[in-house]
Image (tube, rainbow, N blue to C red):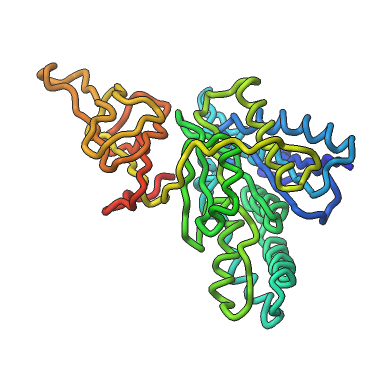
Amino acid sequence: MATLERLPLVPVAPGTRRSLTVRRYGRPGARPKVYLQAALHANELPGILVLHHLTQLLEAADARGQVTGEVVLVPTANPIGLAQNVNGRHLGRMELGGGGNFNRGHPQFADKAAARIGNRLTDDAQRNVAIVREALLAAAAALPERTEFEHLRKRLAMHAVDADVVLDLHSHGEAVLYLYMGKAYWPAWADLPAQLGCRRVLLWETDDGHSFDEAMSAPWLALAKRFPDRPIPPSCLGVTVELRGHNQISDAVNRADAENLFRFLQRRKVVAGDPGPLPQAVGDPAPVDGIDHARAPMAGLVLYRKELGDMVKAGETVAEVVDPLADDPAKARAPVVARTDGMFFGRDIDRLVRPGDPFITISGLQPMPEPEPAVD
């Protein structure tokens, strides 16, 4: 039976109160368990509408008794960021109280889980999965909740850390549809990007990630290294899905995304029913360290010479930056060139850049020789 919870957060000031809304479908504890959330970066809104439409599909399926696993859905994962409005502009990426990026610095559970696991692991992989999940839940329950920011992170982690699949819905300025997942889960979970129609799949290899999806997936990889003589399969697929651009919000587009997520749930036996044939994959996997964050050479206005989704060659001009106050108007433009062969898959929504701004993302198939620092 579907349930709706509104979980209060620690008040940030007298007379204020925010809460986290959680919808649950299926029987608690049933497997597979899938956790979905939207708008952790609270200014990235397409996922909210996607989950609105997915909720309606799940409500109907639940009424028919077709939710055979468990689905936990958080329609707006960041009520703090949703309320941050400064001088009439919504700023939902960074916590204005000093907490930093809402999708960075999430708790690392491997060490605390390892201490709780001790010598309990066996030669039975599935038994070990249950032991690890129990330890991860205990580690999440022990997180501090001194501030509203900490309390929000704890609430989210406690709902997600024992899931089989964690889908964190984001968007990227202006972009094609793409996602991030751990290399350890590829190609076993290639049906997800194929079903969604992702143009690019970006694979990471770290076991100490600090984004939300990595914080749920990476402990499994770290614990497998910590206990090499015991089988610990990677048992939480954590994925960041980038739902195109921030402003690509419509019933037609986002309802289709929700329908594809619903078919994925059917394909993975979380919801009963026939998902139909799997669409052909439209994008190749590529390493995260193959991303070129092309930077502005000077301040000015941006003119793009390539379209999103175009394949580009190293040295090719992707955009130009125009200095409208240049002494010589004939020399007012500076090219921004690709440093790798790959797909031009994302760009900032703003058209005014400052020197050094990383405003273009190009995904190549080979690691960059001098990777740019990660862009927050």
Residue drawn at point x = 53 percent, y = 39 percent = 281
- Residue 157, by quadrant, is bottom right
Whether residue 361 sits left or right of residue 207 in the image: it is left
Q: Position of residue 142 (x, y in %)?
A: 69, 64
Q: Nearer the viewer, residue 12 or 160?
A: 160
Determine the residue located farthest toward the bottom in the rendered image: 119
Q: Which quadrant does the C terminus fall into?
A: top left
Q: Position of residue 191 (x, y in %)?
A: 60, 44
Whether residue 10 sits left or right of residue 169 in the image: it is right
Q: Position of residue 103 (x, y in %)?
A: 54, 47
Answer yes or no: is residue 10 visible: no
Residue drawn at point x = 52 percent, y = 28 percent = 246
Q: Nearer the viewer, residue 233 or 352?
A: 233
Q: Which quadrant does the N terminus fall into?
A: top right
Residue drawn at point x = 75 percent, y = 39 percent = 21
Q: Is residue 8 above or below residue 184?
A: above
Number of numbered discs overlaid on the protein picture: 0
Residue drawn at point x = 52 percent, y = 42 percent = 179
- Residue 20, by quadrant, is top right
Q: Is residue 116 above or below residue 335?
A: below
Whether residue 53 sits left or right of residue 280 in the image: it is right
Answer yes or no: is residue 197 visible: yes
Q: Nearer the viewer, residue 105 or 342?
A: 342
Q: Position of residue 363 (x, y in %)?
A: 38, 42
